[in-house]
Amino acid sequence: MSDRDLSGRKVDAVVVGAGFGGMYMTHLLVQQGLSVQGFERGDDVGGTWYWNRYPGCRCDVESMEYSYKFSDELQQEWEWSERYSPQPEILAYANHVADRFDLRRHFAFQASVISATYDEVDKVWTVDTNTGTQVHARYLIMATGCLSAANIPDFQGLTDFSGQTYHTGAWPKEGVDFTGQRVAVIGTGSSGIQSIPFIAEQAEHLTVFQRTPNFSVPARNKPLDPKLAASIKADYGRFRADAYQQPAAFGAHFPRREDSVLGASPEERDARFEEYWGHGGFMFLSAFGDIGASPETNKFAADFVRKKIREIVKDPKIADILCPDSIIGCKRLVADSGYFETYNRPNVELVDVSSSPIERFTDAGLNANGTEFEFDAVVFATGFDAMTGALLQIEIEGRDGLSLKDKWSAGPRTFLGLASAGFPNLFMMTGPGSPSVLANMVTGIEQHAEYIADAISWADERGVSSLEAELDAENKWVEVVNMRSEATLYPQCNSWYLGANVPGKPRVFMPFIGFPDYVAMADKVAAQGYEGFSKT
């Protein structure tokens, strides 16, 4: 559907984004009999998995959990092929969901929302797209994603470079062939760690520019055991319910240990860490119950991974550069497939730009550390303006002409990560102040979509035309989010959880820690008649 045919349309809700959040949100509202108009800047569904097509891209939550639970028929019919699903398979799943529930007809594709303005008299949002279309809606629901606004640092002379440039978060649909090319990868976060081994296999020569080393553990990805999948499907409801009670809403089947790392002998610690290194993925942090309790206990796990890096990487100097000196787990732990082994290849070079940043781009490449490098292509694995970037790219204006950019100039402020005072009938899915990126995103998406749909139904049944977060409730919620983060090691790292990867962005810890607690608090708000929301 072209959004040019929609101008002037009045609907119950506008949903922005056709990823997992926007699709399920639209499905629920349509089931409730509401009219919905969705907008998606891509030419099809998939969200994160539509844009991130870089080589090696895959999910770090296991396939049987990174999927919808709202339809048991969907759960039973879909077959995953690997323990950790690769991007093409997740995108195929998103397309299957869109087909099965006939969701595309509610969306206009290749249509970017550029502004949204609230009319206090008529209590409607006026939504404008980049093609000049204007739609009016009672509710505006932002399903724009936590990791969807690509971050490219403002490198001097970038436009001077005559080669090809790519961002892992906006990869060409047709793919990229690096055969015979001199390639640079800038960044060693998750997308860099996933893509570097694959690019190295193709490229004639690969140079990796690393500002900050990251902890990464083997994913131990493998074909999904059909017997395991069948056993989960036989009692999927209990499997999901158990996961729902986990701090990150997944991994109930992980063999978690509760004993203290301080109570183990050096030999016992090494044996336990070795066991969990063998399990693969996030499970490594479950080796002892207090790895995340303090820098003292955390150091044992961090030292073990540093030891592993030095065992894998043959050049001691390169190994030292790859070893983080930070706390393990305060940045999102990366699960890799042969990442550190890649630095043993003769065609791979590592350049440390931690103390001497990239100076400038040139026609032939770039200058760094006083050296001129020449490349045919540059890959930016520089991550995202996380949590808030996609929201603040849109000019959102609420009551009394208040812009969301101005309100959030010192950092995002929400109630439940769902709503913000001054912006009636605006809901944010997995927004700042919700578990979002610190939980299974699909589970968090479903919880938010159902919560928003229930709130709208509750309001419609009572003739309430406007729901708005109260300022006092918002202030208290921000305090709760901050208090919970300060009781952990998370703030001790310069991570994208705090916006530290984007120059000039306020340093505020954005996710809510603890999925079950969040759900209980949100449910209490609903049970008390959406206390904390003003109703008019």
Image (spheres, helix red, strand yellow):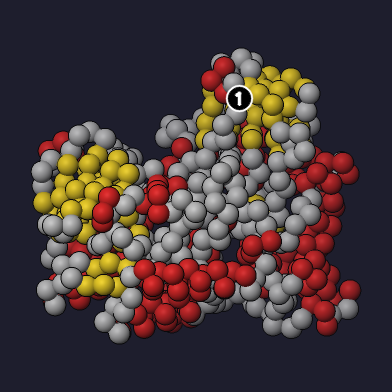
Residue 345 sits above or below residue 221 on the image: above
Q: Residues within 10 Å of mark 1 (few under 14, many from 20)?
A: few
The percent coordinates of residue 535 (x first, y second) are 22, 72
**In the image, is 256 to the left or to the right of 110?**
right
The percent coordinates of residue 312 (x first, y second) are 81, 50
Kindly identify the residue that appears in the image at 64 percent across and 35 percent down: 186
- Nearer the observer, 20 or 78: 20
Q: Amino acid at mark 1?
A: Gln
Tell me the element at label 1: loop
Kindly identify the residue that appears in the image at 54 percent across and 51 percent down: 506
**In the image, is 438 to the left or to the right of 339?**
left
The percent coordinates of residue 435 (x first, y second) are 48, 67
**In the image, is 488 to the left or to the right of 9?**
right
Residue that sits furthest to the front in the current view: 400
Residue 10 sits above or below residue 474 on the image: above
Residue 344 in which image quadrant: top right
The residue carrying mark 1 is: 156
Kindly identify the residue that appears in the image at 56 percent across and 44 percent down: 504
